Every structure is written in C-alpha cells, then in structure tokens.
Amino acid sequence: MSAAYSKRFETVFLCCHEKGPNMSLGAAAKYLKKSKSFVKKWVRHYSIHKNVDDLSNRGKIRKTTSSEDNVFVNLFNQNPSLTLDKAQRKLSKKEIKISKITIRNRLCKYDIKHRSTLLKPLLTDVQVKKRIEENLNRDWDNVIFTYEASFWLSTSTKRVWCVKGKKVIQRTVKHPGKIHVWGCFNRRGFGKLLIFKQNLDAKFMKEMYQRALIPSANK
C-alpha cells in the first residue's frame, strides 16, 4: 500500500470507523501530521463512497483521446515546419476535429513548441527613408539593377516544431547540386538572364558583364 493510501485509511479509522477512537478532525490531523482539510476531505469521501479511492473522470473532459494525441504528435514529428492551419485540415481528413488551440495545448504537453531562428530586417525604417531621399530625383533611365542568386537541389527548414533541446535532423546531401543565376532589369524592361555553375570571381564577373550586362544596356 502506498503512503498516500495509508494516510487515507488511517484518517477514516481514527475519525469514523466503528472500531476506531472516533477522534475529532483537528485531533486526527495533529496525530497524522496532516492538514485538517486533508482529514475532512477523506472522511467526507468515505461517508459518500465507502472507499478512499480517487474518483474516475475527474477534472475537465478531454477533447482528444491518447491515440488521437499520438496521431498529431507524430504528424508534427514527421513535418516539423507544419503550420497549425494545415495540421487542422490534415487532422480533419482523419476525422479528428479539434481547434488550433487544442492542437497547440497538446503539443505543449509534450514540450513541443514553435521555435525559430532570430530574424533581422535587411533595412531599418531610417535607412529606407534615407535611401528614398538620396534617389528621389535620380534618372532611372540610366540605371540598371543586377542581382545574382543560387539555387540548391535540397534546402533546410530553420523553423520547426520540436522538444526543447532536441536536434531535428533533416536528410540532405553533403554537397548538393546547385546553379547560379544572374539577371538585370531597369524601368524599360528585363535584360539577359545568365545561368552558370562555376564560382563567381573577378575574372568571370568581367566575362559576365561582357556577355550579359553590356548587351542588355545597349538594348
């Protein structure tokens, strides 16, 4: 018998059992080194239910079963970047109709929270205002914007649902295939689009300007 149950039985014996000493609530509490409310609670419980067991189905009624909890916990484990809206729709197809708040609460129960990397804006409001003032009267017919970007065959997600301290592993290759793209445009339209694989150094940049930038400017 556990220590908790032992104290409950002692309470009943001391206060209301026919072979007990029939102590008062205060005296029994002092003898057991428990609070008077503890003694009163179990004396009353015994008088109603004739036992000292915990009642079943106590507290707030759960909206999901344990098996349903496992379904959407596994759902987020398989797809950590899943949003609550998409999760709710996926669960609805499985005939599990619950609110986004309930989904979040269940995830928090398993210490699964939406953790993200620190985001920093490229330009502050002051910097944006300053650049607008500097370029407000510029002749944009004589300006060409250029930009280069890289595209990988496999990418990683930086914001996922996971337990604190757990490292989420995403399968990828060590050196994924990638291509680089360079393009340009101005207010009159788009220029040439150049696709290449080699690293962009000074020598190739000069070649790129000759092959793409100058012809686009002339056009």
Image: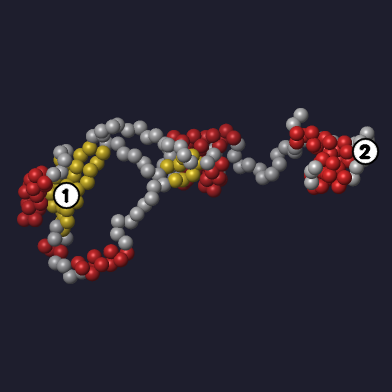
What residue is rendered at 13% in x and 52% in y? Answer: 191
In the picture provided, is 124 more to the left or to the right than 204?
Answer: right
Label 2 sits on a secondary structure element that is: loop
Residue 50 spot, x, y in % from top left: 84, 36
Residue 139 spot, x, y in % from top left: 14, 67
Q: Quadrant of residue 102?
A: top right
In the picture provided, is 119 more to the left or to the right than 151?
Answer: right
Front residue (pair 30, 51): 30
Residue 207 spot, x, y in % from top left: 7, 45
Graded by Cα atoms within 10 Å as few (under 14), some (14 to 19) or many (20 or more), the crowding at tag 1 reads some
Label 1 sits on a secondary structure element that is: strand
Q: Is residue 135 above or below residue 182?
A: below
Q: Is residue 119 above or below residue 4?
A: below
Q: CA distance from mark 2 to mark 1?
A: 94 Å
User: Do the CB atoms of the residues marked 2 and 1 lie less than 8 Å apart?
Assistant: no
Give the foreground label among 2 and 1: 2
Q: Which mark is residue 21?
A: 2
Mark positioned earlier in the residue sequence (2 or 1): 2
What residue is rendered at 23% in x and 34% in y? Answer: 177
Q: Which mark is residue 183?
A: 1
